[in-house]
Image: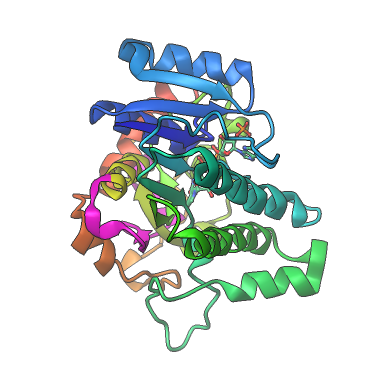
Amino acid sequence: GKILVTGANGYVSVWIVKTFLEHGFAVRGAVRSERKATYLGSLFQSYGDKFDVVVVEDITKDGAFDEAVKDVDGIVHTASPVGIIQGDAAELILPAVQGTVSILTSALKRGTSVQRIVWVGSAGSVFEEQPDSNLKAFTEADWNEPAIREVETKGATASGFAKYSASKTLAERAAWNFWNKYRAEVAWDLVVLNPTYVFGPILHDVDRPENLNASMRIFYDAAVADARDKETLATWGSSWVDVRDVGLAHVLAMQTPGAGGERIIISNDVYKLQDFVDIAHRLYPQLPAGSIDYDPTVATHYQVFDTSKQRKLFKINFCPMETMVKDTLEDFKARGWI
Ligand code: NDP
């Protein structure tokens, strides 16, 4: 089969593309410019005509993907702005929502061969801030409504994370609404994957650490750049998953019949930044030691997920933290960043 992957040049996406190719699929990557197409072309050169790239300059335009969706069996939509912005949340929300409606509309009108669409969500659309007491594990039934409310009430002064989470939550809702409206007319079904923080080695085009994608910048700042204070290292964290497991989850989401119509949290385990720092410092003593009196056994985790659905459907043998940190630092070292 052939899979269209949008935002194909991003951190997570390049691994998604690679994993589909390794599983024998053909892949068409959609990117915003020729320059990005050239990088991917050389990265996946060994796959010959099993990999091709289309340039879609503006994903929000009507009919943007009309050509790209032709003759593909599946679509993975990852293109969405990621990051902490100072200004109006619309900067994130508009491309996230309109890009989603745009690809689904092209699939509805022109995607006659499409069987399934895997939409890349985020755990940020699932969890919300929670108080110290009555901690709970979030499930696929949870939606980050408070992020939307925060953006509605505070506008540009809402937190950066609320703006990003609101964009992902509103876009995911748009995807489900669209599918529920047209499901009787289309041959495809919808799967949404909601990964937690993604870490691990990088394959995409990054010239220097400052230009890393948002999640890997967090890793780099903590483990290599010594840019976080000890208190933050010991107390800031969430849940995480290795980028290679996320790649595999997308292939399984495309192939597993029972995944159709499901929203699925993809996560390995909880972390505090100091957990990464501990491993990094042990492997590379020249890297920062961070908070040396940190005790992982007494850390409190607020962003904890019930992962029974992913386990039942996908049975991924998750990459352990030690391996993720080791492989990531080897990658950084090869780039001269350590
Ligand atoms: P990257 O920033 O590396 O990739 C983002 C991709 O989206 C790039 O291809 C980028 O293209 C594209 N994109 C961004 N804004 C626009 C826009 N306005 N129009 C068209 N394309 C756009 O981030 P990640 O790889 O981390 O994120 C990929 C997906 O995974 C996102 O949907 C994100 O929400 C999701 N995700 C990521 C997690 C993580 O921890 N990394 C966790 C959970 C979900 P360009 O290079 O041209 O800007």
The quadrant of the rendering that contains the N terminus is top left
Residue 314 locus on image (x, y percent): 22, 54
Q: Nearer the viewer, residue 319 or 192?
A: 192
The quadrant of the rendered image in which ligand 1 is seen is top right
Which quadrant holds residue 168? bottom right
Answer left or right for 315 relative to 261: left
Residue 82 visible from this viewpoint: no
In this view, the residue farthest toward the front is 185
Q: Nearer the viewer, residue 41 or 281?
A: 41
Answer left or right for 197 relative to 104: left
Residue at screen point 47% across, 27% down:
29
Answer left or right for 86 relative to 223: right
Please tell me whether residue 54 is drawn above or below residue 145 in the rendered image.
above
Q: How many numbered marks have been drawn onto this rendered protein structure?
A: 0
Q: Which residues are magenta?
A: 255-280
| Residue 260 lies in the magenta stretch | yes
Q: Nearer the viewer, residue 242 or 168?
A: 168
| Residue 41 lies in the magenta stretch | no
Please tell me whether residue 180 is drawn above or below residue 97 in the rendered image.
below
Residue 184 locus on image (x, y percent): 43, 61
Residue at screen point 26% across, 40% down:
323
For the rendered model, the colour scheme is rainbow
Which quadrant holds residue 231? bottom right
Residue at screen point 44% across, 69% down:
303
Residue 207 locus on image (x, y percent): 57, 21
Residue 114 visible from this viewpoint: yes
Please tell me whether residue 68 is drawn above or below residue 198 in the rendered image.
above
Which quadrant holds residue 43? top left
Please tell me whether residue 136 is drawn above or below residue 115 in the rendered image.
below
Residue at screen point 18% across, 55% down:
315
Answer left or right for 315 relative to 293: left
Residue 247 locus on image (x, y percent): 34, 40
